[in-house]
Image: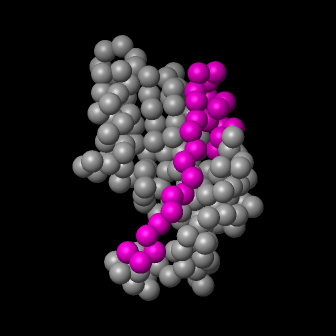
C-alpha cells in the first residue's frame, strides 16, 4: 500500500460493473470524483450472476481482511433474469433463489465491519430494439418484462 489507508469503495457485479470503468462510465466517474479521498476498486465480472457471486464472496470480501470497504455497490440481476438455457448452463437464476442470494450477499457485506455500507443497484430498463439489432437471436428473451421482477425484488427486498 502507498501512504495511509484510505476508504475503499468497491463496485461488485456483472458486466454493467465491469464496463463501468470504460471511458465515461459511471465507475470511472466515481473514481474521478473520489480520486483524492477514496480508492474505487472494480470487482465486475461479465456474465456473472448472483449464484456465481455467492460462491466467491469470501474470497472477494474476506471477513478477516485488515482493511474493509467503506462502501460496496452491488449489481446483479440482469444475467440472473435471462430465460433458462436449454442446456441448463445459462446464467438464469430463479427469482426466489436470486432474492435469497442477494440477501446472503448483503448480510455478508454488512458483517464486514460496523462502518461498511452497501448500495444495491437494480437491473435497469433496457432498449430491447437495440439489443435485437446488435445481438440478433443470440440472446433471446432479454426483455424488460422478464427483468422487471428481478429489479422490483432488489427494490423491495434490499431496503
Identify whether 19 is placed above or below 87.
above
Q: Is residue 118 magenta?
A: yes
Range of magenta residues = 105-130
- Outermost residue on the left side: it is 23
Q: Is residue 89 visible?
A: no
| Lateral position of residue 138 relative to residue 150, left or right | left
Location of the N terminus (image quadrant): top left
| Lateral position of residue 137 relative to residue 101, left or right | left
Q: Quadrant of residue 148?
A: bottom right
Percent across and percent down for residue 149 are: 67, 63
Q: What residue lies at 58% left-to-right and 80% top-to-bottom?
A: 85
Location of the C terminus (image quadrant): top right
Q: What residue lies at 57% left-to-right and 52% top-to-bottom?
A: 122
Q: Is residue 133 magenta?
A: no
Percent across and percent down for residue 66 are: 51, 21
- Outermost residue on the top side: it is 4
Residue nearest the viewer, comparing 10 with 60: 10
Percent across and percent down for residue 124 are: 51, 58
Q: Quadrant of residue 49?
A: bottom right
Q: What residue lies at 35% left-to-right and 21% top-to-bottom?
A: 37
Q: Is residue 69 visible?
A: yes
Residue nearest the viewer, comparing 51 with 62: 51
Identify whether 142 is placed above or below 99.
below
| Lateral position of residue 52 relative to residue 17, left or right | right
Q: What residue lies at 59% left-to-right and 67% top-to-bottom?
A: 147
Amino acid at each position: 500500500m502507498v501512504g495511509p489507508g484510505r476508504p475503499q469503495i468497491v463496485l461488485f457485479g456483472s458486466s454493467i460493473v465491469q464496463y463501468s470503468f470504460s471511458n465515461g462510465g459511471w465507475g470511472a466517474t466515481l473514481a474521478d470524483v473520489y480520486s483524492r479521498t477514496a480508492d474505487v476498486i472494480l470487482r465486475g465480472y461479465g456474465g456473472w450472476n448472483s449464484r456465481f457471486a455467492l460462491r466467491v464472496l469470501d474470497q472477494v470480501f474476506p471477513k478477516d481482511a485488515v482493511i474493509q470497504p467503506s462502501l460496496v455497490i452491488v449489481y446483479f440481476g440482469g444475467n440472473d433474469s435471462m430465460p433458462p438455457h436449454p442446456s441448463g448452463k445459462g446464467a438464469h437464476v430463479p427469482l426466489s433463489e436470486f432474492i435469497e442470494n442477494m440477501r446472503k450477499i448483503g448480510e455478508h457485506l454488512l458483517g464486514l465491519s460496523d462502518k461498511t455500507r452497501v448500495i444495491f443497484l437494480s437491473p435497469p430498463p433496457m432498449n430491447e430494439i437495440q439489443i435485437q439489432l446488435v445481438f440478433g437471436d443470440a440472446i433471446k428473451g432479454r426483455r424488460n418484462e422478464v427483468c422487471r421482477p428481478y429489479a422490483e425484488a432488489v427494490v423491495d427486498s434490499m431496503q
